[in-house]
Amino acid sequence: MPRLLILTLSTGEAALPVLRRQLAAQSFTDFRHEIISGLPNQTAHNQLYRTIMSRASSFDLFLKLDADMTLRADTSLADALRRPSNTPTRSTSHFRSGIVSLKKRRSACTSSALV
């Protein structure tokens, strides 16, 4: 399984503690979760991109999870990572996963995650 860095941008979302607990309970554990918080939107995104570029040699995949997203199951990460493993260009693969946006759930839609 690949080494994964999960990056979360946060502006004080109430769901962030839930996401952190769900990540701790995942069956896939070869990941690091970092939260970028307290920054204006553009600055936070610039930090996210700089983090990805500077850590590219240390991780195989990067996943941006919004702070208001939740995971459907304890296997959500493992399920999501298993899917693109057969795709030649994983870095640009889109896949449907067990990750749900709370904002979108209100409108009865699921989200797609980008890895």
Image (cartoon, grey):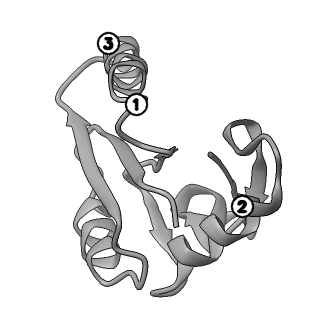
Q: Amino acid at mark 3?
A: Thr
Q: Amino acid at mark 2?
A: Ser
| Residue 57 tag number | 1
Q: Amino acid at mark 1?
A: Ser
Percent of width and height locating residue 82: 67, 71
Residue 43 to residue 10: above or below: above
Mark sitting earlier along the chain (1/2): 1
Tell me the SS state at disc 1.
loop
Tell me the SS state at disc 3.
helix
| Residue annotated with mark 2 | 85
Percent of width and height locating residue 18: 29, 72
Mark sitting earlier along the chain (1/3): 3
* Extreme residue toward the left, this view: 38
Q: Which circle, 1 or 3, is nearer the viewer? A: 1
| Residue annotated with mark 3 | 43
How many numbered circles are shown? Answer: 3
Residue 115 to residue 32: above or below: above
Residue 105 to residue 103: above or below: below
In the displayed structure image, the side of residue 11 where residue 48 appears, left or right: right
Percent of width and height locating residue 17: 22, 67
Q: Quadrant of residue 74?
A: bottom left
